[in-house]
Image: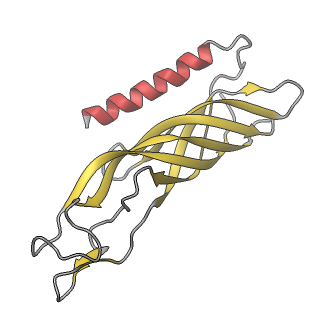
Amino acid sequence: MTGRILATVIVFLLASTAAAQDPVPNPFGIGWGGGFAFSSNLIGVPLVDPGDAFIDENGIIRITHPRNVKARVLLESHYTFRLAGSPLALGPVIFVQPSGESLFDAAGGGLLLELGEGPTSFNLIVGILIDFDVSRLHRDYVDGFRSPTPDLVYVQREEVQLMIGFAMSMPNF
């Protein structure tokens, strides 16, 4: 839990530092918003939640719902640099996925492309996130092969994932 909070604080500090180095400061401060994203694990083994796999009557492992992509709801904070003579802006972004059980399910950072000017705008986000609670079958349990034990063994861990998202910026304060 402490590692998750520390990672979140570090990401927020990095974005604040990048915003402070802008030669033309944004008079409204750092922007923020909310949106949706999709993340994909960077290794080939699919994500498997408990209940998405079973051992059949012959002792063979069967995975019913493998996933390589996860849908997410994000809260984001960003600082953009307006491209000269254009309604487009580009800048660093940090984001978190709130959780019902712990503080966050995932956190990360990346690059935000702001499409439009004004109090609200549509944004495209590309980045890397750390998922704090990934569930996978243990590496000895492979779909289509005989199970080494009578029960499936799942591994919970943190994992780096690639993320693409869309967000709507809110008015700055």
The percent coordinates of residue 29 (x first, y second) are 65, 22
Residue 42 is left or right of residue 115, and the answer is: left
Residue 88 picture location, percent across and down: 80, 35
Nearest the camera: 171 or 87? 87
Name the image quarter holding residue 81: top right
Q: Residue at x 24, y 78 (%)?
A: 54
**Vertical placement of residue 56 versus 8, above or below:** below
Q: Quadrant of the N terminus?
A: top left
Which residue reaches farthest left?
149
- Depth check, front residue: 45 or 49: 45
Q: Is residue 140 left or right of residue 13?
A: left
Which of the 4 quarters of the picture holds residue 171?
top right
Q: Residue furthest front?
A: 145
Quadrant assignment for the C terminus: top right
The residue drawn where x is 50% and y is 22% is: 14
Give left or right: position of 129 versus 91.
left
Give coordinates of residue 85: x percent, y percent.
89, 27
Residue visible at 78% across and 26% down in the picture = 82
Q: For this rendering, which residue is in front, 100 or 157?
A: 157
